[in-house]
Amino acid sequence: MQAFLTGLIVAHAAFPAVFATYPERQQDGVDGYIAMSDCSEIGNQYILVRQGIRDMLVAVADCAQARHVAQRSDQGLIADVDIALWIGGMWPQEAELWRVEDRARWCEKWLEATNGD
C-alpha cells in the first residue's frame, strides 16, 4: 500500500467561484476540496496527508485547464488545496493523496504493528 500521488500542493482560493458555477460539486462529510490536473477525478474523494497535520478527507471539485497540465506535472504539483484547509506559508508544500480505502488499511496495519502507539 502506498500513496496514490506524492508531490507538491499549492493553495487554491477560487472554490467559492467554482461552487457558484458548479454547485453540484459540493459534498457533505468532507473536510474540504482540491483541484487536480485530471478532470475525470472530479467527484472522487481522497485522504490528504501532510507531515504534522491530521489526515483530511477531501473531494476533487475542480481541475486544471488543459494548457496547464504539462507545466503542473513538470513542477511536481499533485493538487491545489482549498485555502480553508491551508496551513503554513503560501509556498508549495509536500503532501500525499491516498485512496480512502488504502489509507484506512495502511493505518490499520500501522496500529497493529505499533500496538496503537
Image: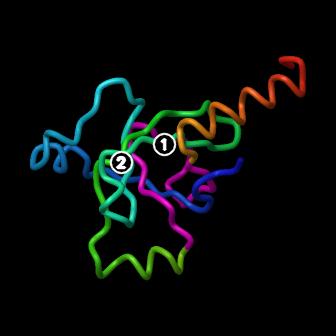
Mark number, residue 35: none
The local secondary structure at tag 2 comes to: strand
Which residue carries the number 1 mark?
46
Residue sitting nearer the eye, 104 or 34:
104
Seen from the viewer's position, the closer of residues 1 and 11 is 1
**Residue pictured at 37% horizontal, 65% vertical:** 38
Question: Would residue 77 be found to the left or right of residue 59 on screen?
Answer: right
Residue plotted at (25% across, 52% down): 14
Amino acid type shown at disc 1: Tyr
Would you place residue 110 above or below residue 68 in this image? above
The residue that appears at 32% across and 67% down in the rendered structure is 64
Give, as a three-letter code, the residue at label 2: Val
Query: Of the numbered discs in the image, which one, if any, rests on residue 60?
Result: 2
Q: CA distance from mark 1 to mark 2?
A: 8 Å
Q: Give how far across and how far down residue 7 sits, in percent.
A: 60, 62
Residue 21 on image: x %, y % = 9, 49
> In terms of secondary structure, where does tag 1 sit?
strand
Q: Are marks 1 and 2 in contact (CB under 8 Å)?
A: yes
In the displayed structure image, the side of residue 65 where residue 93 appears, left or right = right
- Highlighted range, magenta: 76-97
- Residue 14 lies, with reference to residue 117, above or below; the image says below
Q: Is 63 one of the magenta-colored residues?
A: no
